Image (tube, rainbow, N blue to C red):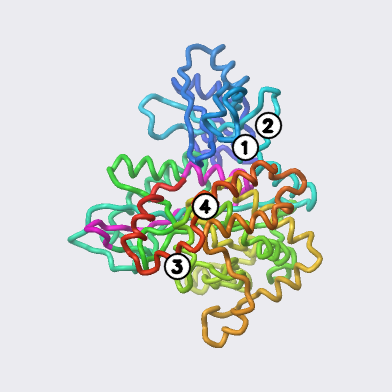
Amino acid sequence: MMTRDEYLMDPNKLVQYLQKMPNEFTKEDLIRYIEENGIQMINFRYVANDGKLKTLNFIITDRNHLDNILSTGERVDGSSLFPFIEAGSSDLYVIPRFKTAFLNPFSEVPTLDILCSFYTAQGEPLESAPEHILKKAHNCFKEKTGMTFKAMGELEYYIKSTKAELYPGEDQKGYHDSQPFTQWENLRREAMVLIAQCGGKIKYGHSEVGNFILREDGYEQHEIEFIPVEAEDAVDQLLIGKWIVRMLAAREGALVSWAPKITVGKAGSGLHIHMMLEKDGQNLCVENGKLSDTAKKGIAGIMDLAGPLTAFGNTIPTSYLRLVPHQEAPTYVCWGDRNRSVLVRVPLGWVGASDMIKSVNPCEPADPRDFSSKQTFEFRVPDGSADIYSLMAGLIVAGQHGLEMDNSLQMAEDLYADVDIFAPDYKEKLDALKQLPTCCWESADCLLEKREVFERNGVFPKGSVDAVVKNLKLYEDNGLNDRILGNVDKIMEIVDTYIHCM
């Protein structure tokens, strides 16, 4: 049981006021907060086919009206939100998920925002809604394995402004830069504060490597990284985080982009996903001070489904301008420890390292606690074009697939890469590794080949897989990278086309 002081330390204003955690919020809690804090408006928020947060505004007129909104949700035109819903029978319900409620940090009118789920005319969850696909995937994973799938994302983005004259940043040397050599540190810090107040669990933020001048404009790359939470919550905080960063940039008249590639030869932006398998509150990724067989099996599942996972995580042609050799982005299906060129990286996880604080601070006593529970494994392929709900659902399916495969430990051993995979003495093994898709067209083919795994247990509806494949094929980008190689003008035309992805 948390104490009052612990609730007050939580940045979420509703947690502070209601003295309970979000997953305990009830309708009556929200009504009390609204009444006692002068809230005048409610926004229902939900993600449709384009991956962006939609909004439905309600002015609160009286308590009965408020109770009705929170009890029944509202109907919306599904055919305008999803291409697979026909106009002739298009009505859907949007039903608020109370645990997601947060105080809107931008509205001049005191407003409470709540994320919603889609339901059909029969009162059943919309099977093809991305949010419900994720819920089905996680429920199946819990039922089949007895584990909980936790995750978090790294939001990497570029922000464009006029070129800095007084303290210009150094090209491709922006990693952890501070003011005055970065112009947008204040915006990142403000975004972190607002995301936390809206319920996001943030680990840290910093400037990233990408830093360059293009067409007389300066580009800076930044990152906000979260703490692992249950998969559904991980997606919610990513979506709210992207919205907040965009809102702040718009206020400043600056362009922010999650696009995987901004220009040729410079660092791209990924959406790295860290994962953790947990049971009864214990991280199962570590056993006896080493990466566990459970984690290795999960990694093997991701290796086996790496190609089709790009169909959810790398959804535009410029995704494949980022996935090229020697750019700290994966191109081959392999994994390793602390290796940034591999598909799945096992980052430092406080395994085998202890008492460093005492070493630096001699007045501190030795700390006997085991911090290896922080260990994760990281999928480095996706980017900001990802359908985050479907991507997370796909990763859960892949993790379960690895836990159920008979040969997963052998696969993990065979695909382990403990060196720079592009080193000359690694060439023989490199030639034996599978490559990731090089375009949306190939990504779609990979999904078609493995679709049965994703459709198993009713997680991904057949129609949803068909729709993903159709959208990827529409780009007709097979062989695009070879056709535009060296043609900077054509490359920049494509970059500009997809600058506002998701």
Give x and y (percent) for residue 207: 38, 59
Quadrant housing residue 278:
bottom right
Taking the spot 66% from the left edge, 74% from the top edge, the residue there is 415
Instruction: Indicate left or right for 5 with 251 as reference.
Output: right
Q: Residue drawn 66% across and 54% down? A: 448
Check contact, mark 4 vs mark 2: CB within 8 A: no
**Residue behind mark 1:** 129
Query: Which tag, 2 or 3, sits closer to the chain's start?
Result: 2
Q: Which kind of residue does numbered mark 4 sit on?
A: Thr
Crowding at dot 1, Cα within 10 Å, few <14 / some 14-19 / many 20+, comes out as many
Instruction: Name the amino acid type tagged 1.
Output: Ala
Between marks 4 and 3 in the image, the one whose residue lies nearer the viewer? 3
- Name the residue tied to disc 2: 125
Indicate left or right for 407 with 461 as reference: right
Residue named by callout 3:
482
Mark 3 closeness class: few <14, some 14–19, many ≥20 residues within 10 Å: few
Q: Disc 2 versus disc 3: distance between alpha carbons?
A: 44 Å
Q: Are marks 1 and 2 in contact (CB under 8 Å)?
A: yes
Disc 3 residue type (three-letter): Asp
Please provide percent x and percent y for residue 145. 78, 53
Range covered by the magenta-colored residues: 213-241
Q: CA distance from mark 1 to mark 2?
A: 8 Å
| Mark 4 and mark 3: Cα distance apart in space | 19 Å
Q: What is the secondary structure assignment of the residue under circle 2?
A: loop
Q: Along the polypeptide, which appears first: circle 3 or circle 1?
A: 1
Indicate whether residue 437 is drawn in magenta.
no
Q: Does residue 101 appear in this view?
A: no
Give the residue number, with chain letter if any, for mark 4: 315
Residue 28 percent coordinates (x, y): 61, 22
Residue in front for this viewpoint, 82 or 389: 82
* Secondary structure of residue under mark 1: loop
Element type where label 3 sits in the image: helix
